[in-house]
Structure formats: C-alpha cells, structure tokens
Image (spheres, rainbow, N blue to C red):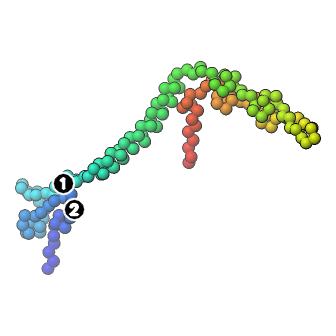
Amino acid sequence: MATSSSPLTALHSSFLSYTPTTPSMAALPRRRRPGCRYPRIQAADLDQNTIVAISVGVVSVAIGIGIPVFYETQIDNAAKRDNTQPCFPCSGSGAQVCRFCTGKGTVAVVIGGGETEVSKCVNCDGVGSLTCTTCQGTGIQPRYLDRREFKDDD
C-alpha cells in the first residue's frame, strides 16, 4: 500500500523551511491546531550585485517615467507664457534670403567661351527669399520644446 505524503514534505525550497516533528505528522491531514508548525518564509540572502541590479532597475523605471512627465509640464507652462522674442535667423521678418541666388531671383551660369546664361532660381522660384525654417514664417523665435516634433512611429 502506498503511503501518501503531505504536500509540505515534498516541497523543497531554500525560502521555505518545514520539518515535521514526527513521521506520523506527515501523513495527518492539515488542521489548524495550536502549536502546529507552518512553513515560514526565510529572509532572502541577497549579495551586493543583486542589490545594485535591483536599485538600477528601480532608478531606470523612475527616470523613464520622470523625463516624459517633466517635458509635458514644461510644455504646459511654456504655453501659458507669451512669447515675443523675434526669430534670430530671419530677424523677425519671417523670410530668409535665398542662398542660391542671394536674393536676386536669378542665377547666372557661365557657359564655355565666355557666355553666361541667366535663369530663374530653382530654389526660390525667382522670388529671392524663402520662408524661415526656424519660425515657419511667424517671425517669433519658437521655444526649445515647441521646435520638437513628437511623431508616433506606429
């Protein structure tokens, strides 16, 4: 006849300690009686590397949550303040001089034999200026966080 053993006698773990006092206690059904021993969880034996690894993990999660929250609060605070600083590259005009034609609207190309051909600038379509890429034509210097474009890559 096979003897049934208690689930606690078959449990082997470094965290649990349970030793039945007599062999007959292992076969008894589990009942709550005063003085009966229950499995106890022992303190985990942690070395310095484990503590450092856990600390780094907790700090990483805190930084991963904290930085986006910081940026969001700064964006909200910046939206509440008025921005009247003129744009630096275009001096507040909203337009920049074309670099290809230097504002003339035409480009002169020297062809062999001393001939020159004058054609309309392909960069600015002959206008001589382009919309400022920093302020997008508003003439107001954007704040640092306003210049960032957050795009969803999904």
The dot on residue 62 is none
Percent x, y of residue 29? 12, 65
Observer-nearest residue: 7 or 75?
A: 75
Ranked by sequence position, the earlier of labels 1 and 2 is 2
Q: Is residue 40 left or right of residue 69?
A: left
| Element on which disc 2 rests | loop
Mark-to-mark CA distance, 1 and 2: 10 Å
Who's the residue at 52% across and 21% down the image?
A: 81
Q: Nearer the viewer, residue 28 or 80?
A: 80
Indicate the secondary structure of the residue bearing disc 1: loop
* Residue in the image at 46% along x and 37% along y: 68
Apparent side of residue 61 relative to residue 50 in the rendered image (left or right): right
Q: Residues within 10 Å of mark 1 (few under 14, many from 20)?
A: few
In the rendered structure, find residue 42 and report the number of the disc placed on it.
Answer: 1
Query: In front: 147, or 29?
Result: 147
Give the crowd class for mark 2: few <14, some 14-19, many >=20 residues within 10 Å. Answer: few
**Quadrant containing the N terminus in the rendered view:** bottom left
Q: Is residue 31 left or right of residue 144?
A: left
69 w.r.t. 30: above or below: above
What residue is drawn where x is 66% and y is 22%?
Answer: 92
Q: Residue at x 45, y 33 (%)?
A: 70
Mark sitting on residue 13: 2
Q: Disc 2 marks which amino acid?
A: Ser
- The amino acid type of the residue labelled 1 equals Gln
Pick the residue in front: 34 or 14.
14
Where residue 137 sits, quadrant-wise, is: top right
Position of residue 58 relative to residue 10, above or below, is above
Residue 101: image location, x then y, percent:
80, 32
Please indicate, yes or no, whether residue 110 appears anywhere in the rendered image: yes
